[in-house]
Image (tube, rainbow, N blue to C red):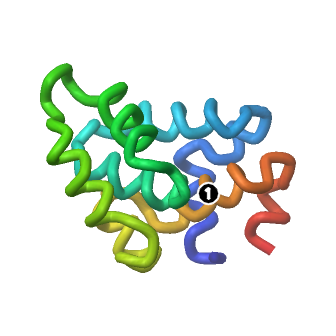
Amino acid sequence: VDNGRPVYRRRGGVKDRDKDANQRLETFLDGLRPWPVRLAAIHRYLQPQADLASFSAFLRERLPRGSLTDKRAAELYERYGPGKFNLNDQGYVARVHPLELWLLGYLQKQPQATFGEAVA
């Protein structure tokens, strides 16, 4: 984690400490190009228990209208499900630093945690 601290600090993790989980996720996603695979990897890592309907809704909210079929959504849901990839691979697929993804997930589960608590 020590090697990753500067990465998340530079990208704004510290300034997000007063935001709730949804605001943090939106801030995180605002800086990314919305590709289906990328969004799928992020969502399935952060919300592994989510059902196909909420996963599809998440993707459709962020992708151009009509660009995601039900079949493609189901394929992505299955392909990037829990246990399919380790954290490094999830980060690679999502094109984000794995520690950013991990920290975002940690702060969703522990919203009151400080940065110091997260990396301790």
Q: Residue furthest top?
A: 65
Q: Position of residue 55 (x, y in %)?
A: 40, 43
67 up-or-down from 21: above or below: above
Residue underneath mark 1 = 105
Q: Position of residue 43 (x, y in %)?
A: 44, 50
| Location of residue 22 (image quadrant) | top right
Q: Is residue 61 left or right of residue 115?
A: left
Mark 1 closeness class: few <14, some 14–19, many ≥20 residues within 10 Å: some
Picture residue at 82% right of the left edge, 63% below the top = 116
Q: Between 91 and 54, which is closer to the camera in this rendering? A: 54
Q: Is residue 22 left or right of residue 110?
A: left
Picture residue at 36% right of the left edge, 76% below the top = 84
For the residue marked with disc 1, what is the amino acid? Gly
105 up-or-down from 18: above or below: below
Quadrant of the image containing the C terminus = bottom right
Q: Between 9 and 111, which is closer to the camera in this rendering? A: 111
Report how many numbered discs are placed on residues in the image. 1
Q: Is residue 7 left or right of residue 67?
A: right
| Location of residue 35 (image quadrant) | top left
Picture residue at 53% right of the left edge, 33% below the top = 27
Q: Position of residue 62 (x, y in %)?
A: 33, 29
Q: Between 97 and 58, which is closer to the camera in this rendering? A: 58
Q: Position of residue 88 (x, y in %)?
A: 41, 76
Local SS, label 1: helix
Quadrant of the image containing the N terminus = bottom right
Picture residue at 45% right of the left edge, 39% below the top = 54
| Location of residue 2 (image quadrant) | bottom right
72 up-or-down from 119: above or below: above
